[in-house]
Amino acid sequence: LKEGYSPYKDKFKLNSKSLEYTAGAALDYAYGIKLSELSETSVKDYKSRYGRFKTYLDKRNLLDKSILSITKQTVNDYLQTIVKASSARNRNNTRIVLSSLFGELENNDVIPRNFVENIKVLNTKSVSHRTYSLEVLEGLFAYMKKNDPVLLLFIKFVSYNFLRPIEVCRLRLKDIFLSQKLLRVQAKNKPEKTKIIPDIVLREIQDFDFSVQNHFLFTPTGIGEWEATESSRRDYFTKRFWKLKKKYNEYLLATGKTLQLGGEYTIYSFRHTFITLLFRKLRKEFTYTETCDKLMLITGHSTLDALKAYLKDIDAELPEDYSGLLSLI
């Protein structure tokens, strides 16, 4: 694939009337090109979404017709069926996949232009990952330390290294360089990124046995092998935290406290929380721009605009008390 070979190249069907690529063959060709660029999780996502689109075309007798017969309206109609059946978010994610495939077809002169990229992105309600208060953090960390230290360490990598949960699941021992206090991980927006390991995390892992370099840092019992996809590994820790949170809520009630942590409190919430805490601490000494510049190096956001948009979404910066501005006297 890296040398330009595609397993789908020889499987093109020619439309007898136009001698052009059929829709099905063209989509297979584009998917074959994308394979070399996608992560394990993305491969499954792409295959599923473009596969369902092919099924849609087949039911409408479009799959074996020229790829040029697939119009912007065709794709729009398909995306509309997704909105009705599930959600705008699912529809937008399918749009991203189809736009990527049609982009490959444009790049390889199979179609004149990628019209999917001009299809509107629908507004969606963002998934809520509510930040934790300091009081809740202290109580929850203490409870995990006693009842699930493996999960606590997993969450510390999210909290202190600002990794996404799926990035933590990707970590193998060979990705960690103790002497240099560095780790490398496959990121959301680029093949690989390198991050420092802060001492607060380093102290937790420096005495681990690193002899089997290909072992995962996190499995259900700690370091070891784990025959599961990365999405399955992430889902495992998501469910494990959900179960612990349920027990923690029961513990709170048993100790006379009324606080209950709902579904909006997630593992991802820890990342939001500690980025917010770090941002506000830096803002006490630096300007907004200086703070963002320093924070970008720590969080791993690819661009300053992406970081600023993220900070806005999580309400990292709040105004000072403005009561004086409201006084009528």
Image (cartoon, rainbow, N blue to C red):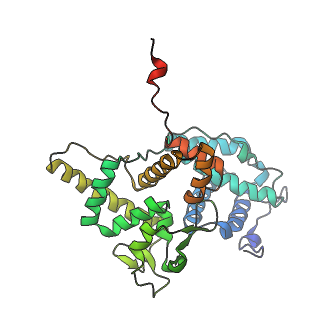
Which residue is most to the bottom?
A: 211
Nearer to me, 120 or 58: 120
Residue 183 x %, y %: 54, 72
6 above or below 306? below
Label tally: 0
Q: Which residue is pictured at 30% across the width and 48% down the height?
A: 135
**Nearer the observer, 97 or 211:** 211
Taking 232 as reference, is 134 above or below it?
above
Whole-percent x, y for residue 177 in the image: 53, 78
Picture residue at 60% right of the left edge, 45% below the top: 308
Q: Which residue is at 40% across, 63% downward?
A: 156
Query: Who's the residue at 42% across and 66% down the image?
Result: 200
Q: Is residue 302 left or right of residue 3?
A: left
Does residue 125 appear in the picture of this structure? yes
Left or right: 122, with 7 as reference point: left
Horizontal side of residue 118 vs 49, given as left or right? right
Provide residue 233's location: percent of width, then percent of height.
43, 68
Quadrant assignment for the N terminus: bottom right
Dividing the picture into quadrants, the one containing residue 40 is bottom right
Is residue 4 shown above or below 55? below
Nearer to me, 256 or 233? 256
